[in-house]
Image: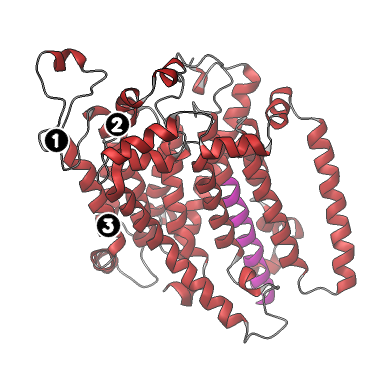
Amino acid sequence: MRFVCDNLAVMFVAILTSLLAWLYGGTRTDVIVTSVPWLLLFMFELIIAFPQKARGESTGDARERVWAAMKKDPLVWTALGFLLLLAIPFANNGLCVNCDRALIALGHSPEPPVPFIPFCVDRYRHLGVFLWFAAAFAGMIATKHCLRRRGKRLMLGMVVWNGFALAILGFVQAATGAEGPLWQKIGNVANATDFFSTFGYPNMAGDYFTSLFAISIALWRRSVDDAAYERRSNSTDMKKSAHGRFWRKHLYLVPAAIMFFAAVNTLSRAAIMLVTLLLAVSFVHSFISFTHPLKRSEKVRRGTIALGCVALVAFFAISSLPDDVQREVDTIDATEVLTRVTGKGQYHVRVATEIWKDHLLFGVGGWGYKHFCVPYMTPEEYKQLQVVGGINVHNDYLQFLAEHGAVGVGALLAILLMLIVPVGASWKSLAAAARFTDAKKAPPKPTALFALPAPAFMILAGVTATFIHSFGDCPLRSPAVLTLLFVSLAAIPGFLPKKETE
């Protein structure tokens, strides 16, 4: 019971981040509108009443500390400013020239009452988008201010094990021939394989499990570092059996393996490439880190063993790929990737760009692209109208520009920079300090790469994978992915040296 009371804030944030994935990835507006307001109410209660306490700190002192820090944090005010931009269109609603033709024919003007401020044409859909960002920012702010360093790590661990359950659910659904998420048939999807677990779109599922793979590796590396520290300090870790010490160090490799295969089995080609790249990066980074203190002959011996094991696993993995996964892998090529990233194969990029040029500052509101795209299409493009998935640009950056304008995207970029820049500053400081560290304790070379703690490096690598994926698809249109991205960035200070963050 004491654990629950001390970690209420951790559980609130973990529930918010995890539940969005169970709610069909957060993509169903009807589910989001009826559930997320309650989640936000609980999060507001958390921020007011139950922040994590420091050692020797009373609950009242913790509240005062959190509120004082929030009032001075530009991140909080920028997030609230962006939400204010999204709130204005509820009172400034226009008509859709494509779907409100009957009203326009009766003489109603399609223009909003005040055309030069933020507006939308579908309040209900726009409310869904508003709740996406409200949930993501609530989780981000609570993670940064209401969770202590250990709480940030514990929260990510809870999210990872929730993802483990989601992945197992996906494999069970595939084995039982489910026709849609949670065994519910997807009415507007022709191919029953275009889903995985609770996600109705494979690229969103692929990015979600790819991100969780990176976080799992981050937590594994932290567990290894903690075990090494306890061994050096002759703490209670030495009293445990070898079996107990092994699982204490390597337990997170279990969800990491499951997340990898889940990302592959989503049949998202981008996820297959990115999670494989993350696996290679984590392997090389871990191998260099673990063998750094060893003699050259021992490095060569362990390197040969490691490469042999990797080759063996790769051989069995490739030879046993399911037919549908093998089909997706066979279609991956450089030309296909370049076409998808540049948008040359579809009309969406051109249309979204034209919409943004006409609504430069504030865009056309949440889900506005769906309502505005048809009038901007040429007759030839209209003949090739994308029915399934055509309401998204398949480039998150252009869709955010078209729907939220330069001001909205500028605010989002500022929020991301306020999360990433402090980590970069700590990275730079740690790299500079490593030059004056004893050779036996110094990180491997290149020092600039290995100075940042491995868990923080892996979380940044997972976030980078999402940013890359967003150039050619729409993973950030899933609130589950969006919230995981902001929360994981806000949790990075929990893996940095204490003197760098507190």
Residue 427, percent across and down?
A: 53, 71
Residue 202 in view: yes
Horizontally, residue 437 falls left or right of residue 360, namely: right
Tell me the SS state at disc 2.
helix
Tell me the tag on residue 92. Answer: 1
| Of pointers 3 and 1, the one earlier in the residue sequence | 3
Separation of marks 1 and 2 at Cα, in angstroms: 14 Å
Quadrant where the C terminus is found in the figure: bottom left
Tell me the SS state at disc 1.
loop
Residue 488, percent across and down?
A: 47, 53
Separation of marks 2 and 3 at Cα, in angstroms: 23 Å
Q: Nearer the viewer, residue 490 or 11?
A: 490
Q: Which marked residue is nearer to the observer: mark 2 or mark 3?
A: 2
> Which region is colored magenta?
212-235
Location of residue 359 (image quadrant): top left
Whether 392 is drawn above or below 469: the answer is above
Q: Amino acid at mark 3?
A: Thr
Tell me the tag on residue 78. Answer: 3
Q: Main secondary structure of the magenta part?
A: helix
Which residue sits at x=40%, y=71%?
A: 55
Location of residue 434 (image quadrant): bottom right
Location of residue 293 (image quadrant): bottom right
Horizontally, residue 356 falls left or right of residue 214, namely: left
Which residue sits at x=50%, y=22%?
A: 182
The residue wearing badge 2 is: 368
| Of pointers 1 and 2, the one earlier in the residue sequence | 1
Q: Amino acid at mark 2?
A: Gly
Q: Amino acid at mark 1?
A: Asn
Q: Nearer the viewer, residue 313 or 396?
A: 396
